[in-house]
Image (cartoon, grey):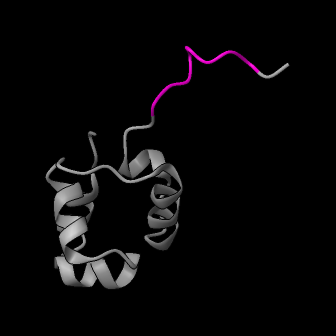
Amino acid sequence: MKNRLRLWRAENGLTLEEESDLTGLSIAMLSRVERGQRQLAPLTRVRVARRLGMRVRDLFEVEELDDVDPPR
């Protein structure tokens, strides 16, 4: 998953510990997400973005739903 979480943290001069305090995620999880080793569930992405005052699409790649049939 392409994400901009590490870039956001660097631009704001935060440590992983400070980012963890803001997001409620563990340092280990944030590190894995930043390195592309783990993905966050969609609702967790929303929660993280809200806690950081960002839009989800500004922090994470948003999957397109083109292949999904619209509801009837």
Magenta span main SS: loop
The N terminus lies in quadrant: top left
Q: Nearer the viewer, residue 15 or 63?
A: 63
Residue 54 pos. (x, y %): 47, 61
Figure check: 3 above or below 69: below
In this rendering, would 21 be left or right of 13? Answer: right
Can see residue 21?
Answer: yes
The C terminus lies in quadrant: top right
Q: Residue furthest right?
A: 72
In this rendering, would 49 be left or right of 30? Answer: right
Q: How many marks?
A: 0
Q: Residue at x 48, y 73 (%)?
A: 51
Residue 36 pos. (x, y %): 18, 47
User: Does the segment drawn in magenta span residue 68?
Assistant: yes
Q: Nearer the viewer, residue 50 or 25?
A: 25
Residue 58 pos. (x, y %): 41, 48
* Residue span colored magenta: 63-70
Q: Residue at x 52, y 66 (%)?
A: 50
Can see residue 14?
Answer: no
User: Does the segment drawn in magenta span residue 11?
Assistant: no
Figure check: 25 above or below 60: below
Q: Residue at x 16, y 79 (%)?
A: 15
Q: Residue at x 54, y 56 (%)?
A: 43
Residue 30 pos. (x, y %): 24, 66
In this rendering, would 28 be left or right of 25? Answer: left
Figure check: 37 above or below 12: above
